[in-house]
Amino acid sequence: MNTPIDVSNVILKTERMILRPWRQSDLEDFFEYASVDGVGQMAGWPPHENREVSQMILDSFVGKKKTFALEYEGKVIGSLGIEYYNEEKFPELKDVSCREIGYVLSKDYWGQGLMPEAVREVIRYLFEDVGLDAILCGHFLWNRQSERVQEKCGFRHYAYGTYETRYGTVEQDETNIITREEWLQKQKKEYRFYGWENATVKDSHGLTPCDYYDLLSDIWCSETCAPRMRADWSERNKTLGQCSITSFLMQDLYGGEVYGVLLADGSYHCFNKVGDCIFDLTSEQFGDVLLNYDNCPQQFREVHFASEEKHQRYEILKERLLAKLEKKDDH
């Protein structure tokens, strides 16, 4: 059943954003992103043709009290609505306290991990503060970005269907679900690198890739970052420029092969494959961009380490990781 929710006095905060009720003063920010081609279509509505359209929808946001404005650095860059799900479509949920969420983000801010950050906080609010039993969330089958956001936030497949958009098309869609029990289980520990859910292989120390992610998070730094990316490295984006040296270091520990995703600039982003287990400890640097890990060419250390500079960074990373392992073993 659709549980009544009023967010008109609710303010949520994440590391980088404020999620708050919409205000009439948000009109210009709203029109700025909602008028851009390719934004609204991701959620089934056409670009706003003028401010009058934006004003009408803004009035609806304010009046219906179920949609958050996503404020980033003082500017509204998107929305996240706590919508009513279709009770006729999902009658089996009649005894379950449930709502459906939907979201839109300004195209200028795609690929920075902002939407998963917002969705995670709203999930927390709905389960912890409101007390919902389940949350639904859907996406068009061609919308890989939204699919990836939902995967990152713990949603799982629930149903396939169709959706009639406001621009006259009928799209194939997928509805995903997360229950409060599933969310509580995931709170114990969750990672954001690709493949973490199935990265259960262990090395001679009895450690999994998730364990090494934790250790390396204290080691990755500008010194181990590729020089061409060093100016953009930050504590918030620790995995930037670390892919090849990290992947070959994991190969030292687990064996297996290192493969590379071909990027637009002609370089390869390295990741590991150990048996049937594929993981990419440094995938977070790409934000919401979903890499294709299928049919990638194998990478070889003699080729990568032909660069003395890269080999030196690998040795630094290796030395510092071994020091951490020794300290860990001592305890």
Image (cartoon, rainbow, N blue to C red):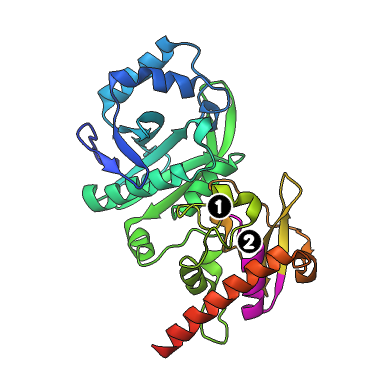
Horizontal and vertical percent position of residue 31: 44, 18
Q: Are marks 2 and 1 in contact (CB under 8 Å)?
A: yes
Judge whether residue 32 is colored magenta: no
Counting residues from the N terminus, which is met first, the one under dot 2 or under dot 1? 2
Label 2: which residue?
Answer: 243
Mark 2 nearby-residue class (10 Å; few <14, some 14–19, many ≥20): many
Q: Residue at x 31, y 37 (%)?
A: 19
Horizontal and vertical percent position of residue 279: 60, 65
Q: Amino acid at mark 1?
A: Gln
Q: Residue at x 40, y 53 (%)?
A: 178
Judge whether residue 251 is colored magenta: yes
Question: Which disc is residue 285 wearing?
Answer: 1
Left or right of 161, for residue 235 = left
Question: Which disc is residue 178 wearing?
Answer: none
Asked if residue 164 is positioned above or below residue 204 in the image, the reply reads above
The residue positioned farthest toward the left in the image shown: 9
- Quarter placement of the C terminus: bottom left
- Quarter placement of the N terminus: top left
Asked if residue 228 is positioned above or below residue 309 in the image, the reply reads above
Q: How many marks?
A: 2
Horizontal and vertical percent position of residue 173: 55, 40
User: Please, what secondary structure does the residue beneath circle 1 have?
Assistant: helix
Left or right of 178, for residue 193 = right
Which of the 4 image quadrants contains residue 250? bottom right
Horizontal and vertical percent position of residue 143: 58, 39
Which of the 4 image quadrants contains residue 277? bottom right
Q: Nearer the viewer, residue 210 or 92?
A: 210
Mark 1 nearby-residue class (10 Å; few <14, some 14–19, many ≥20): many
What is the CA distance from the residue labelled 2 to the residue labelled 1?
10 Å
Q: Which residues are magenta?
A: 240-257
Q: Amino acid at mark 2?
A: Cys
